[in-house]
Image: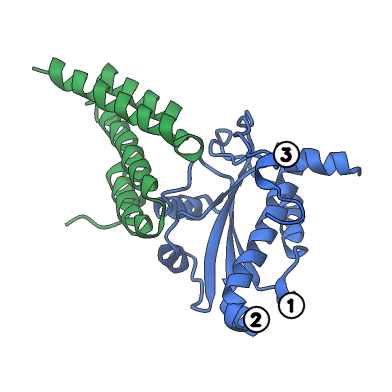
């Protein structure tokens, strides 16, 4: 695989908020590949603070939708990306902040893998953590941070405008 | 009193859940997201009115306008606010026309 291939995947991934009707099942091996991409993300001090709750049961997905105002469309699966607070605390005072960065990188890995498999995704922070914990029996020391919706797509959304390299990059000083 | 069986499929309950979780979510979210949740709720309400046979053609057009423009909140704040202004004007026309 060339660097152009990787850039193509990075640039092609879109936040998908409208999935194909019918909630087609995503094969087990695809879900596993997506999760595997997640656990190969870097993490501060190699703490690997992540935990992933995979939800594919339609009734449970519908219940999560009820408490997730930022979740649009009908996904085939949801990955609840969580921080294991007990592991995160091993990172010291800034451990939880670092853990958020770590699970964010894991999330990006998973979304890129999903895209490379032809699956749309969207990271969602606008959901009730309290309600999702209750619905999925998530213990106290596990904190949901993001939902990743997954599903097949009829049409990929157009890319939004990007701030240019010239605007955001500062060489050798700001 | 009715039981809770099947309540999660009830469109009114779905809207209720959306409103309550949005109320809490808005505490931590960007201020513009408050308007996003309200306008999303409006679209959901039109859906309920449609199911109950109360939605007029004008209301369905309002919903179409919301669907076509709601994502602007992510990319173009100015265009999003202009869309809200348009929506208010369209609503006012419906109110004005009503007997």
Residue A126 appears in the picture as rendered: yes
Which quarter of the rendering shows the N terminus of chain A?
top right
**Element marked by disc 1:** helix
Q: Which chain is green?
A: B
| Residue A152 position within the rendered picture, expressed as x and y whole percent measured from the top left | 64, 38
Crowding at dot 3, Cα within 10 Å, few <14 / some 14-19 / many 20+, comes out as few
**Element marked by disc 3:** helix
| Residue B85 position within the rendered picture, expressed as x and y whole percent measured from the top left | 30, 28
Q: Is residue A66 left or right of residue A73?
A: left
Residue A118 appears in the picture as rendered: no
The Cα atoms of the two marked residues, 2 and 1, are separated by 7 Å
Name the residue that disc number 1 marks: A45
Write down the chain letter for disc 3. Answer: A
Q: Is residue B50 left or right of residue A174?
A: left
Image quadrant where residue B24 sits: bottom left
Task: Say which label, 3 or 1, has the lower sequence index.
Answer: 3
**Residues at discs 2 and 1 in contact (Cβ within 8 Å):** yes
Determine which of the numbered discs, if any, sits on residue B17 in the image: none
Determine which of the numbered discs, if any, sits on residue A11 in the image: 3
| Residue A144 position within the rendered picture, expressed as x and y whole percent measured from the top left | 53, 66
Name the residue at 51% across, 76% down: A139
Closer to the camera, A165 or A12?
Answer: A165
Closer to the camera, A155 or B53?
Answer: A155
């Amino acid at each position: 695989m060339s660097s152009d291939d990787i850039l193509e995947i990075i640039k092609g991934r879109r936040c998908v908020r409208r999935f194909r009707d019918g909630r087609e099942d995503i094969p087990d091996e695809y879900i596993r590949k997506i999760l595997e991409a997640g656990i190969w993300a870097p993490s501060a001090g190699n703490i690997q603070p992540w935990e992933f709750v995979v939800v594919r049961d339609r009734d449970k997905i519908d219940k999560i939708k009820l408490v997730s105002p930022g979740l649009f469309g009908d996904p085939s699966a949801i990955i609840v990306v969580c921080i294991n607070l007990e592991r995160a605390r091993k990172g010291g005072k800034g451990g939880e902040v670092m853990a958020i960065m770590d699970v964010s990188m894991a999330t990006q890995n998973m979304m890129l893998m999903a895209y490379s498999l032809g699956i749309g995704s969207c990271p969602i922070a606008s959901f009730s953590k309290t309600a999702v914990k209750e619905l999925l029996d998530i213990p106290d020391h596990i904190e949901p941070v993001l939902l990743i919706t997954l599903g097949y797509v009829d049409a990929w959304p157009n890319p939004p405008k990007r701030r240019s390299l010239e605007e955001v990059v500062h060489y050798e000083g700001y | 009193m009715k039981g809770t069986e099947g309540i999660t499929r009830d469109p009114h309950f779905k809207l209720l859940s959306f409103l309550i979780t949005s109320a809490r979510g808005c505490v931590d979210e960007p201020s513009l997201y408050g308007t996003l949740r309200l306008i999303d709720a409006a679209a959901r309400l039109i859906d309920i009115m449609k199911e109950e046979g109360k939605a007029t053609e004008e209301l369905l057009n309002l919903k179409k306008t919301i669907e076509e423009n709601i994502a602007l909140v992510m990319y173009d704040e100015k265009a999003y606010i202009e869309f809200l202004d348009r929506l208010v004007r369209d609503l006012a026309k419906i109110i004005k026309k009503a007997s």
